[in-house]
Every structure is written in structure tokens, then in C-alpha cells.
Image (cartoon, rainbow, N blue to C red):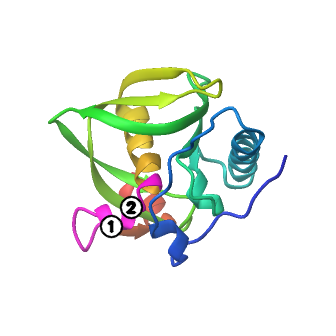
Amino acid sequence: MAVREILQLGNPTLWQKSLDVVDPWSASTHEIIHDLDDTLRAFRESHGYGRGIAAPQIGLLQRIIFIRMPDNSFAGPMINPDISWESEERREVWDACFSFPDLVVRVSRAAEIEVGYLDSEGIKRKVQVEGGMAELLQHEIDHLDGMLATQRAVSPTAFATCAEWESRLKC
């Protein structure tokens, strides 16, 4: 398939709501899935991080995300994912994004969520996750809803460049 260009902060496509995938079995849906996987792998190889990517980040307004956890605990597409439940407990985390790779943003996320989705075979699945996976899925599903982490910042000072974060905040 293909490594696609990742849209950057300021591109209006990133603020648009994605459409549901009507035919999860179609060749075009599977082409998007492969392009997301290829693009995620390429980004991870060149930047050293990356666990997930959403179709809008490559300019496609379809409700598809692709997740590849570094520990191989989960790898694959999630088609039409939707958060069906979230815990009241919240956690503040520093959020990084492929669409603004030189910036991190402090956001508040639910500590635990339940997500319904279709897998690549069109089978309905439901998963309950916490911690890093919950944060990741909320971030990627936000992309499908036209919401960026920059819009979820906990305060006007909740931004740092990656260099600042690595040198003073991460320590």
C-alpha cells in the first residue's frame, strides 16, 4: 500500500467530523487500513514513537483508526469506534500527536473507557481499557470527531515543546 503524508496543525481537515464506514469489507476500506498501518510504521521508524493513527490525519474523513502497541498487546484497525462508557476518574497526561510533532499538550482523560467498534472482518467488538490504552483511544477517537488535543488543553499554559518537555518536565 502506501505511506501517506500526515496533515499538520492548521489544516482544516483535522477539525472536520469523520463519516461512518458503511462497508467495512470493501477494498477501499482495506486500502485505508493498510495505508494507516504503513504510515504509522514509517512515523515510528523516523520519530521513535507512535502507537496509533486516525484516518483524518492522512486526509480521509472515515471513522477508522489503526493501533499498534509497542508491546504487541494490540495491533489492528478499529472501524467506527465509539466510546460507550467512561469512568468518572480522570487523569492528566501529556499528549503528543503526529499532527504537531514538536509540541506536547497537557490534557484530562478518563482513566478507563469502553469502546465499541468493528474489526477488519466487520465483526462487532467491545473492549474495556485503562491507562495508556484508554488515553490513546480517546486521543484517536477525538481525531474522528474533529477534536485535537490542543482544544482539550487543561489550561493556557498546558503546552510545551518536545525539547522543553524532555529537558524539564519529564525529569
Tell me where residue 153 appears, x and y as whole percent. 29, 64
Task: Please tell me whether mark 1 sits on a helix, a strand or a loop.
Answer: helix
> Left or right: where does residue 121 sit relative to residue 165?
right
> Left or right: where does residue 114 sit relative to residue 148?
left
> Left or right: where does residue 130 sit relative to residue 124?
left
Q: Which residues are magenta?
A: 144-158
Q: Which residue is mark 2?
A: 147
Up/down of 66 relative to 55, above or below: above
Does the magenta-highlighted stretch encompass residue 95?
no
In the rendered image, is residue 59 in sight? Answer: yes
Q: Residue at x 58, y 27 (%)?
A: 119
Instruction: Name the residue nearer the viewer: 4 or 121.
Output: 121
Q: Residue at x 30, y 31 (%)?
A: 113
Tell me where residue 122 appears, x and y as whole percent. 59, 26
Disc 1 vs disc 2: which is toward the camera? 2
Q: Which residue is mark 1?
A: 151
Q: Residue at x 41, y 29 (%)?
A: 116
In the rendered image, is residue 9 in sight? Answer: no
> Left or right: where does residue 161 sit relative to residue 151?
right
For label 1, the crowd category at 10 Å Cα-Cα, with few meaning under 14, some 14 to 19 and many 20 or more, is: few
CA separation in Å, label 1 and label 2: 7 Å
Q: Quadrant of residue 111?
A: top left
Instruction: Name the residue nearer the viewer: 23 or 167.
Output: 23
Q: Quadrant of residue 109?
A: top left
Residue type beneath disc 2: Met
Magenta highlight: main SS: loop
Task: Please tell me whether mark 2 sits on a helix, a strand or a loop.
Answer: loop
Residue ranking furthest to the left:
88
> Dots 1 and 2: beta carbons under 8 Å?
yes
